[in-house]
Amino acid sequence: MRIDAMEETARRAVQTALAAGADTVEAAVVDSEQFDTTVRSGGIETLTESRSSRIALSVSVNRRKASVTSSDLSRESIARLVAGSVELARLMDEDEFFGLPDPADLGETPAELDLVDDSIARLPADEKIARARRLEETAIGMDDRVITDGASFTSGLESVAFANSLDFCGSQTQTFAAMSLSLAAGDAGGGGENTGKRQSSYWYTAGTHLDDLESIEEVAGRAVERTIRKLGGRKPATCEVPVVFDPITATAFLSHIASAVGGGNIYRKSSFLVDRLGERIAAPGVTIVEDPLLPRRLGSRLFDSEGVRTRKTVVVAGGVLETYLMSVYQARKLGLKTTGSAGGHSNIYMEPGERSPEEIIAGIGRGLYLTSLFGPGANWSTGDFSQGGQGLWIEDGRLAYPVNEFTIAGTFDGILGGIAAIADDLVWRKPVAAPTFMVDAMTVSGT
Amino acid sequence: MIAWQDHFGVDDKRIAAILGTALSRGGDFCDLFFQHTIENQIVHEEGIVKEGHQSISHGVGIRVVKGEGTGYAYTEELTAGRMRDAALTASAIAESGASPGPVALEPVHFENRYPVVEAATGAALRRKIAWIEEAERAARACDERIVKVTAVLADSLSAVMIATSDGRILRDMRPMLRFSVSVVAEKNGNRQIGISSGGGRIGTEYFDTRTSPAEHGREAARQALLLLEAIDAPAGPMELILAPAESGVLLHESVGHPLEADFIRKGTSAYTDRVGDRVASELVTVIDDGTIPNDRGAINFDDEGTLPRRTVLIEKGILKGFMHDRISANRFGVEPTGNGRRDSYKSPPIPRMTITYLANGESDPGEILRSTKKGIFCKSFRGGQVDISNGDFVFVPIEAYLVEGGRITAPVKNLTIIGNGPDALSRVTMAGNDFAFSDGRWTCGKGQHVPVGVGLPTIKISEITVGGSDLSAQGGGG
């Protein structure tokens, strides 16, 4: 659908709902196109092309709220949807905190975000498949111990048109492309406990522009390195040591913090950061920023899902919690102002430091370099943290040997407060990004 | 009763034409997956019925399979032109140029595994509101330390029609109900969360026949209050007792996923080439069975039209077989097992579990506890995850206790259990005679989300690594 037709559909849905008795209306029309191929051992494993549309409507009647979505955008269907939503809203309880944004906050931030790469649409399907094939071949050519679990190329476009009953109407479009590679390798293990076990790993690159992706050689090289260096792994002894989070695990950790500062979790009291604005929650070196206005980033946007103008927000400054990330409703519940974060946060990152990861590792006598975290044990609601891990053991400032089948445990407060060093390696691959950082002590549970 | 062709606006002739287009460049087989889903959700939060949601989705997914390759496309507009375009896109996987003749479609008969008295999707909204209010009142009445209660009733009804190039057509109505209560309990700045949820492919009779809203409310409150008193879990290797039903999530992660045959055909699972090997203690028999009536994981047929069956994966410790979709079954020359499942018309099917359980044992559960010197007793779980390539898994208990000298001594919190599938199952030293299925709350995420069931009797694992943060119990660590 053309973007002006999408805006027209959104505006018309707003008018239809007002006519049906709604007091306030918000309508979003989302149109997406995606191409996805996975190649394994040279053959095409999957080849998927899709085009999808949906409309999402939120209405209120006397501050009673309902929301509906549908994949059918025909006029008749939207009329039925509207009628159903108004009827549903009338049966809800009144919510005194509900309301549309202050009209002064509505609008598009004047900025050039450069989120559309026209060359993605022009790249033929055959070339996308060929790139996935080359990625796989390159990795196999680098080390004959790896077996492939598939290389993929994904690309597409998403457009959103949004209108509300305060006469706001806007739209934004973004393209994306990504390449990924999954590998495994058999562990000869030298008769140790992992002999005969397989180890697997992956690497990927993603961005709004083809030119921003890492090269095929880089992606293959990182995937091979991350797989091979797991071979010969041991289970570490149970102990308390410094832990270095690599950019993958650091980013996973930061994603949990992004949830914990979300206004919805704060007013529901489901966050360890409830009632802590203005407090020191992290070591003085830690600064965490939400920035929706970074050019060419996957999380960038000019207005949020309520039509509120976006802006850069410093969430944690020098270890002090400055603000939560909130929508209009969440902010009203907390007696605060919206940060333009409706629909979830945009780009969020931890500011990098000045030392290289190698320098940080070199300063550790005995510790853990953490490369993978798994399981649902990062409980930012209560602040408890206990996850399965994989990584490399650090001895005398060097990565000595791989370790696996252990857990690391502590608390979010303990980890944030214990961040003793932050490296300079901030790389964007999704809307959350964190550099390597070191926590002074955590409990590693193994043998 | 819905008139199916009218529902999707296509007749057998149109379906045959789309199948023909999809296979116009060759391919081994092709299927069409039509789906129309209505989902409802109402949320009770902070003392009010806060918001109602409804979502409607409608589309057809077209798949062409050539060897182990899949061409896939879907459209949400069920017009002849859009469906033909999608069929041509999916056909690009094949290159032989062969064009098969027209397809004659025969309806496939199947048994209904989820009869419902009253589908929740048709129930009056006022009754749904009464249920969430009942749960909220019950939770709040438990204790003044309960500071937040959220109750959610979610239901859906999905009309599915599958047509295949081998001439089968199947039509199904899939109901689903899920009820969930979460509470926050607070005392002196310590904040804990309790959750109780359940449901299945069942109607509103669930509340009378299985668990009432008030019971869910009280259960969530009980858990949160218990956790206020919990101590930090110890760290290191120790004995583990798993309580019946919900503990099946450990089985799902540790051995279920690695036995899904896509990982086997790709050679990435730890169980590749191991049929006939001893992979677990002789107390361990593991079964996947999508026919358990009204269970959350029950299916009348899978999402490529295969009827469900009882598949023995491990029998008395010996690996017997895998869970197949049509692609992996073809590759290994076996019958598909009814495990080809998908999230919706937007995704092609892949091998997935249905209801995966460990068969009943013979030990008295009390005896299992009394035989445990030092360990952890786990009753309910937040979830888990597995590394397919080597079977290493983690899972996170919600309600767990320290066991000392054959007795439960204290509730513990903040722990992750980590182990290796084959290793943990070889250490199953006792299995109880108290088997039970979970009260329908699990959703499995493997790229796509599907509802699943789990089940287990009480079992004891002689040694597993418990990842807590308290090192004092083992004298400061190594």
Image: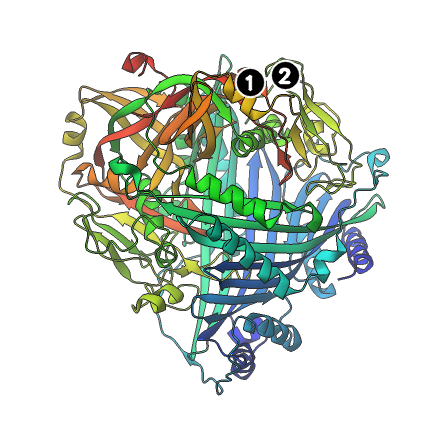
Residue at x 55% of width, y 57% of height: A134
**Which residue occupies the extreme bottom position in the image?**
B101
Of B216 and A328, the residue lying toward us: A328
- On the image, the x and y values in percent for residue B128 come to 52, 46
Q: Is residue B358 above or below residue B229?
A: below
Amino acid type of the residue tagged 1 in the rendering:
Ile
Residue at x 62% of width, y 30% of height: A425
Q: How many marks?
A: 2
Residue B248 appears in view: no
Of A416 and B169, the residue lying toward us: A416
Residue A197 horizontal side relative to residue A269, left or right: left
Which residue in the structure is indicated by mark 2?
A285
Residue B185 horizontal side relative to residue B259, left or right: right
Residue at x 30% of width, y 53% of height: B272
Determine the chain carrying the residue at label 2.
Answer: A
Q: In this view, does A89 lie above or below A12?
A: above
Which residue in the structure is indicated by mark 1?
A419
Q: Answer yes or no: do the residues labelled 1 and 2 have beta carbons within 8 Å?
A: yes
> Residue B328 falls in which quadrant of the image?
bottom left
Of B123 and A316, the residue lying toward us: A316
Q: Is residue A329 above or below residue A153?
A: above
Q: Is mark 2 on a helix, strand or loop?
A: loop
Amino acid type of the residue tagged 2 in the rendering:
Gly
Q: In this view, does A37 lie above or below B164?
A: above
> Residue B472 falls in which quadrant of the image?
top left
Real-space CA distance between mark 1 and mark 2, rounded to the nearest whole angstrom: 8 Å
> Residue A317 falls in which quadrant of the image?
top right
